[in-house]
Amino acid sequence: MKYFSYEGEAHEFDKFRFISEYQYSYFLDNGENCIPRHNSYYRVSVNSKDAEDKIEQILRNGITCPDDVNRILAWKIGGIDHEESKRNGRIKFISSWGDENSASVLVKNGPFSFECNREEYNDFCKRITEIAQKYEKPFSDEKIESVLKDIVKEAEKVKGVGPVYILTILYFITRGQSPIFDRCAYKAVKAIYHEKMPKEIWYENPSSKSVGDILKVIRDYEWYLEMVFGKRNIDRDTDRALWVYGHSNLKLMGMKDA
């Protein structure tokens, strides 16, 4: 298997070298960032370590309250102001996400956006907390499917919570047993397996909320993780490296992706 440097040079894949080379560019204070953070088409923001530490704490300890669900979704969707979070040493939301007096929870990220009625969104966070507290480790495949069914049932009641965000919630409820899913991480691991650049990998954003269709998405991703890293429930370092690698070739190739 191979992966490609920022300059397009092919390297034999070594998972330890790969993770070390890419994961740190995920963070704001890395210094030399390889991700194209701003252009006319979309915005990709690197992350505050303070926000990431809080998210990892939720992953370790489990979802205990609706605020945990809110932080998870803000982290995934783009509702965290990472510059302010870094300055304040704690999670700070962008104004359109964190203003409880506004009628909706809103993120606009170039051509992509998320908007949900705030009352419906708050109720959703409460119901997800109840689901999380209903299940305990360990998580067999059968139990993971049961959790997914419960999440999908609630996601069908609110606008904007699609398959990728459903899989994010599943990731946290299962404490990482079911991997988090991201289009760039998926393209990255598939590219490594097929010895291609991420920009050469075809990807269709999943849109169906059916349990069967979502399971197909995550099982496909798990297969590639198993082939490349030897396990399907990868750690945060590996996920960060894949996320960065999935974005990094865009700078070199002038690609437009999110």
Image: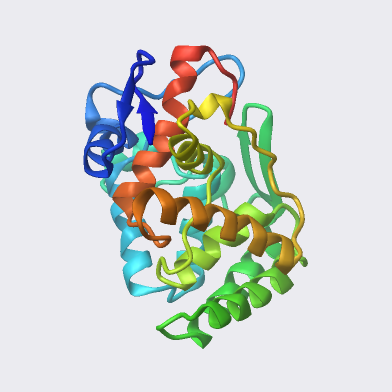
Q: Is residue 179 left or right of residue 158?
A: left
Against 98, residue 59 (above or below) is below
**Any part of residue 231 in sight:** yes
Where residue 48 sits, quadrant-wise, is top left
Residue at 38 percent across and 36 percent down: it is 1
Front-lying residue, 143 or 102: 143
Where residue 10 sits, quadrant-wise, is top left
**Any part of residue 43 in sight:** no
x, y percent for residue 99: 56, 49
x, y percent for residue 113: 67, 38
Residue at 49 percent across and 35 percent down: it is 194
Residue at 49 percent across and 20 percent down: it is 250
Colouring scheme applied when the structure was drawn: rainbow
Residue at 35 percent across and 57 percent down: it is 230
Front-lying residue, 73 or 224: 224
Q: Is residue 11 left or right of residue 112?
A: left
What is the total number of numbered labels drawn onto the structure image? 0
Front-lying residue, 133 or 96: 133
x, y percent for residue 55: 37, 57
x, y percent for residue 151: 64, 71
Against 251, residue 148 (above or below) is below
* Quadrant occupied by the C terminus: top right
